[in-house]
Every structure is written in C-alpha cells, then in structure tokens.
Amino acid sequence: MIKIKPFAEKKSAPQEKKIKADNTVFEFFGTSLGFDVDKKIKNANFYPRTQKGIENFFSVVATSDYDGLLYEIENTCKEMHLNDWGVYLLINRLSYTLFPAQDNEKLLSWFLLNKLGYRVRVALGADKHIVLLHSVKGKIYSTPNYTLDNRKFYVISKYNKENIAKVYTYKNDYPNATKALDFTLKTLPLLAKKIQTKTVSFKEHGKVYTFSYRYNQNLIDFMKTYPQVEYKVFFNAPLEYETYKDIASDIKKYTENKKASEALDFVLHFVQKAFIYERDQEQFGREKVMFAEETLYYEKSDCEDRAVLYTRLVKDLFGIGIVGVKYKDHMSTALHVPMAGESVEVSGQRYVVADPTYINASLGETIPKYRSVMPESFVYVK
C-alpha cells in the first residue's frame, strides 16, 4: 500500500499593501502596489539617442533618492515570495507605469536591476532604441542572445527583429551587478486570490471518475509569462496549495485500499485521459512547456506537459523517486519502484517507465516506437 502524503502547511498570503502617500500605483497579478518614486527619477530621459543619452539618463537617476525605492522593492518582493523572474516582472511593471516611452522604461529597469545586483547590460539597437541583455542561470530557448565577455546575454523583453540584428553595447558595466537571473520556482509567489474551479473526468472500466479542483487565476497569469527555459524549472515547481489539496482528496478517495501499482496506474490514467492532447504549435503557435498547475488549467496539453504533471503528482502524493525521460521528439517519465515492466537505467538504477501520453498504458509500458531508443537525457526532480 502507498499512503498519500499529507498536505503541506500553507503560508498565508501577505496583506495587500496599504496605499497612502505612494505616488506610483499599479496592479501586479491582482495585487495593488504603491511605491514612492523621487521626482528626479520621473524626469530622467533618454536623449540624445546615443550612448551619451544613456549616460544622461543614468546620471539623473543615479543622483536621485533611489535608496528608498530599492528598499520598498526588496521588501515587497520578499513579502510576495517572488523569485528572480517575479522581481524582473515587478520592476518592468513599475518602469512601464512611470514611463510611457519604451526606451526610458527599459533604462530604468536596467538601473534598478543593476542596483539589486542583477547582471544586465544595456545596448543600442540598429534603430537606436534601447535593448536590454540579461545574464541568466541556465538557458532560454528560441530567444536572441549575444556572447559578451565569455557570457551569454539574452534579449528577454519584446523586441523588433531588425533592431536586434546588430547591437552596440554600452561601454560601462555596473561592477556590483553579478547575479544571473534564476528562473527556478522553488516556492510559488504569494499573489492575491482569484479562485476559479475546474472539473475534469475520465472513464475507465465503464466507470466515470470526476475531479474538481480550485486554482488561482493570478498564478496562472504569472506562469503564462515564463519564457522557454530548461525542463528542470517546470518539473521542479510545486502545485498551488488549494489545487493540490483538492486533487489529493479525490485521488485518495478513488485509490483507497488499492495496491501501490494500481494507485500509480490510476494517477497515470487520470493524466492520460482527463485532458485533450494537442501540440504546442497548434495550441499556442509556438513551443510552450507548462507547469503542472497550467496543465490542470488548460483543456489541452502535449507530452511534455503531461510528464510534468504526472511527475509532480507522483512526487507530492507518494514521495516516490521519478524522472522525466527525454527522447528526441517525446517526453515520458520513469519511476524508481520495484515493479515489473519496461524500464530505463538512471544513474545505474532501474526506473520503470510510465508514459502519461500513451493512452491506457500502465506502468512498465512504453510506446512501441521508443522501445529500442535510448533516451537523450533525464530531467531530475528534487
């Protein structure tokens, strides 16, 4: 028998920040935030459209009272449990609120991120517009990048292809800005609650199994902003507490008194059959790996998304070792369990295959096409 792990203790979301004298107010994924911004910062301007203009903007902001703003930003990010990507988004939103002109917006983001210790380079594009280049931990796929001082820098924000064909980097670099942007999502951000409910079902052996679960739309909107980063980021991110609690309750109800293999198969069949299969290009027009929370939100998903969801459920519900199994054109999973069936070797140990896309397959069954194919790599889950 497998005992489902108890629900993790939920930390309460921070109270919404009281907005009184703050002169710059905006909404951040459902939460109203306010910051006191020195008038001098608001008066900074990128002119002329040359490196001299960058220097002019920097000199104005650098002589402003920006310490108080940085303190507020750091406190807010800490209260909201924002990871590096959340910090990046918050600063972008603040800069956008202050400056309708995109170049000024990017220059303020550059200044603030540098002051917070992030390695960001500023450059001029071919059309003399500002381009920000970010140092990141890991890789971002399908994203323009440049190698500067033996480091890769990525263009994360929206860009004009012609503008970034050739960029001219600003000669000065902020010496204390050494942190690379880390997309790891160990803890979910504490966002305002915009709770929605979804119901899904699947049929097996003539019986219909129904699942109802809550999710936070603000968290889904946050996750939608993620660029195409490495698989390990998605595989290792947790589920929202309410979502996990509801899913776990239904799974516990349906798997009561079942054997270990039956319980794991049941969860596998839930992931296989409760959602419609569709490739990313057909659904989004681009590659998009989903977090487990997103796979539960969207009606459709592909092999990568299902592998992420099944991995998360197995890890959280049963505490069993599991990895993502990456083939050239497919993603599956494998479990470290003493069961019969087809398997793969992971770090010298036997892992039993579980394919969340192979409809009606049980543990130990591989899609025939991949039975004699060696996986390209494994995605490890902590």
Image: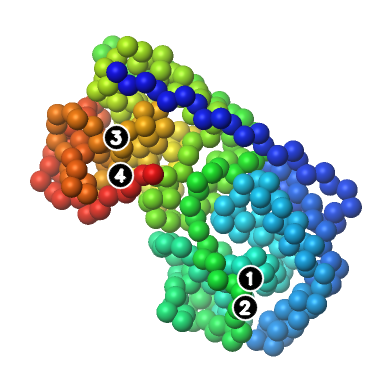
Q: In this view, which residue lies farthest toward the front?
A: 348
Q: Mark 4 — residue? A: 324
Report if the CB atoms under discs 1 and 2 are less than 8 Å apart.
yes
Q: For mark 4, give the secondary structure.
A: strand
Residue 59: x percent and y percent? Answer: 76, 81
Which numbered disc covers residue 114?
A: 1
Q: Which of marks 2 and 4 is nearer the N terminus?
A: 2
Report if the CB atoms under discs 3 and 2 are less than 8 Å apart.
no
Q: Residue at x 59, y 44 (%)?
A: 189
Give, as a three-letter code, the residue at label 3: Pro
Give, as a three-letter code, the residue at label 4: Gly
Give the quadrant of the N terminus: top left
Give, as a three-letter code, the residue at label 2: Tyr
Q: Mark 3 — residue? A: 356
Q: For mark 1, give the secondary structure.
A: helix
Q: Which residue is drawn at 67% across and 60% down?
A: 91
Gap in Å between the C-alphas at discs 1 and 3?
43 Å
Gap in Å between the C-alphas at discs 2 and 4?
39 Å
Question: Is 247 left or right of 367, judged from the image as shown?
Answer: right
Q: Earlier in the sequence, mark 1 or mark 2?
A: 1
